[in-house]
Image: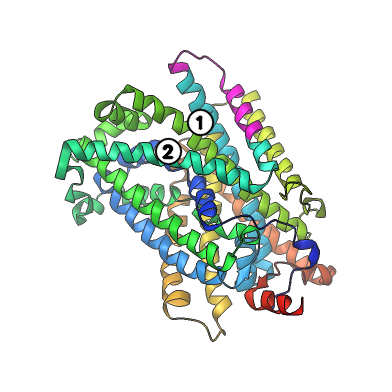
Amino acid sequence: MATATLDAQDQRLRRTLSTPKIVFLVIAAAAPLAAMVGTIPLAFAIGDGPGVPAMFAFAGLTLLCFSVGYAAMSRRIVNAGGFYSYIGAGLGRIPAVGGGLVAVIAYNTATVGLAGAFAYFAQLIAASHGWNIPWEWWGAGGILLMAVMGYRQIDLSARVLSILMTGEVGILAVLDVAILARKHGATFPATSFAPHTVFAGGIGVSMMFAFISFIGFESAALYGEESRDPKRSVPRATYFSVIIIAVFYALTSWAAVGAVGPKNLQNVANQQLGNLFFQLSGDYLNQTATTVMQVLLCTSLFAGMLALHNASNRYMFVLGRDRVLPRWFDAVHEKHGAPHRASLVQTGITVVLVAAFAVAGLDPYVNLATAMLGVGTLGIVVLQASAALSVFGFYRRDPQRHWWRTGLAPLLGVAGLITCSVLLVRNFPTLTGTGNPVVNNLPWLIAACAVGGALYALWLRSARPERYDGLATVETRSAQREKQLVS
C-alpha cells in the first residue's frame, strides 16, 4: 500500500517520550497487580489449577512472536494510529477503517470497565478500614483525576504511572521473595510445567485468562509520534514490556502455586478468589503489607484506566485527522500538546456509561467491569491478530523481508491470537460471570463495528475518493528521511 508523508498540521504531538516512559505507559495499561489479584485466582479455580504458570509462559512466547513482526513494522512506520495504521499499511484501507472503529470501541469499553473495577475495589477496601463511601463517589473521583491527567501532556501521565507501576510490581516481588524464603525449592513446583498438569481440564479457560492479562502491552506504537526516537523506542518498549510482563506473571503465579500447594490450589482459590493474594500477604508478610497491597490494587486499576484512556485518545485523534470520525477530534492543546478534545470525549463516554449502570442499580464489578472489560479484551485480541496478519501484507514484496522477523514469528503470533479469540468467544459467559443474554451477545458489537467500518470505507472509495485516498496513510522512515533532506 502506498504511503504518504504527514503534513505540517499533523506534526503537532510533542516528542517528549523516551523508551522507559513508553514502557511505563504500556505496562501500566496491563495493570499487573490487578491482573494478579483479579485474574489468577479465577484461572486457578476454574482453569487447569497448578498449570496456570505454564499458560502465562505460553502467552508470553506467543505475544513475543507477535511483537517481532509488530516491532519490524514500527521501525518503518511512525504514526499515532496504532492498529489502524498498521492494518492500513499491511492489509489496505478498507479493513483499516473497520479496525480503527473496533479499536475505538475496544479501548473505550476497557477504560470504562477499569473505572468500574476501580470504584468497586476502592469502596470495598475503604469500607474494610471504616470508610463507608458509596462506589459512585469513588468512581467519580477516579474519573475526574483521569480527566485532568489525560487532558494534559502525556509526560505527566508517564511520570505518575512510573511511580504507581513500581509500587505494584514491588509489593508482589516482596511477596515472592517472602514465599521463597520460607518454602525454598517448593516455591516453584515442577508439576506446574508437567504435561499431565498443563493439559488437564480447563486449559482453554486458563489460556484465555493468561492472554487477557497482557492486554495493553501492544500500545507502544500509539506513541510513535510522541517518541523522541520512534525507530528505537517503540520496538524496544514493545519487547521490554512483553518480556517483563510475561516473566513477572509466570513467576508470581508459580510462587502462589508453591505457597498454597498444588494439591489444595483449586479448592483454596475457589474459596478465596479475589482475596487469595491478600491472604498470602497476611500469611507470608504482615497486615501492614496487606494494607499496602490493597491500596496499590486501587492505584493499579487507576493506572490501567489512565493508560487506556490515553490509548483511546490517540485512536480518536487519528481517526478524526483522517475524517473517519468528525474532524473536530483532530485538535492538540496549544500548551499541553495533548489531544484534549478526544480526551474530553473519552471522559464523557466513561461518565455516561458508569452513570447509566449506577442509575440502573447494577453492580460496578459483576455487571459494569466484567461486561465492558470482556468486550474490550475481545476487540483488542482481534486487533492484535489482524496486526500480525498485516505484517505479511506489508512485507510481501519488500526486499527487507526476513524469514523469522516478518515470516514465521508473526505466523506463530497469528495462530496463538486466533486461538485466544476463539476461546474468548466460546467462554465469554465465563469471562463476564453472568448469564445475561444482552451482556453475552456483546461480542457482536465488535463484528458490527468491523463490518460497518469496512462498508463506510467502500462508500468513501466511490463517493468521496479524495477522502478515501487519505485514509490510514502513514509516514515511513524513508519518507521521514526525505523530508529531513528537503528541509
Q: Position of residue 442 (x, y in %)?
A: 57, 45
Q: Does 479 lie within the magenta span?
A: no
Task: Name the residue: 35% across, 32% down.
Answer: 273
Indicate the quadrant containing the N terminus: top left, top right, bottom left or bottom right. Answer: bottom right
> In terms of depth relative to the viewer, which is nearer, 129 or 459?
129
> In terms of depth relative to the viewer, which is nearer, 410 or 177?
177
Q: What scheme was used to colour the molecule? A: rainbow
Task: Name the residue: 79% across, 49% down.
Answer: 334
Q: Position of residue 103 (x, y in %)?
A: 62, 54
Q: Indicate the amino acid at tag 2.
A: Glu
Indicate the quadrant containing the C terminus: top left, top right, bottom left or bottom right. Answer: bottom right
Q: Left or right: where does residue 441 sit relative to residue 197?
A: right
Mark 2 — residue?
168
Image vertical order of residue 277 relative to residue 43, above or below:
above
Q: Are marks 1 and 2 in contact (CB under 8 Å)?
A: no
Please indicate, yes or no, whether residue 74 appears anywhere in the rendered image: yes
Name the main secondary structure of what is drawn in magenta: helix
Q: Earlier in the sequence, mark 1 or mark 2?
A: 2
What span is colored magenta in the figure? Answer: 127-145
Q: Indicate the amino acid at tag 1.
A: Tyr
Please indicate, yes or no, whether residue 439 appears anywhere in the rendered image: no
> In terms of depth relative to the viewer, which is nearer, 83 or 14?
14
Q: Quadrant of residue 294?
A: top left
Mark 1 — residue?
365
Q: Left or right: where does residue 241 sit relative to residue 158?
A: left
Q: Does 138 lie within the magenta span?
A: yes
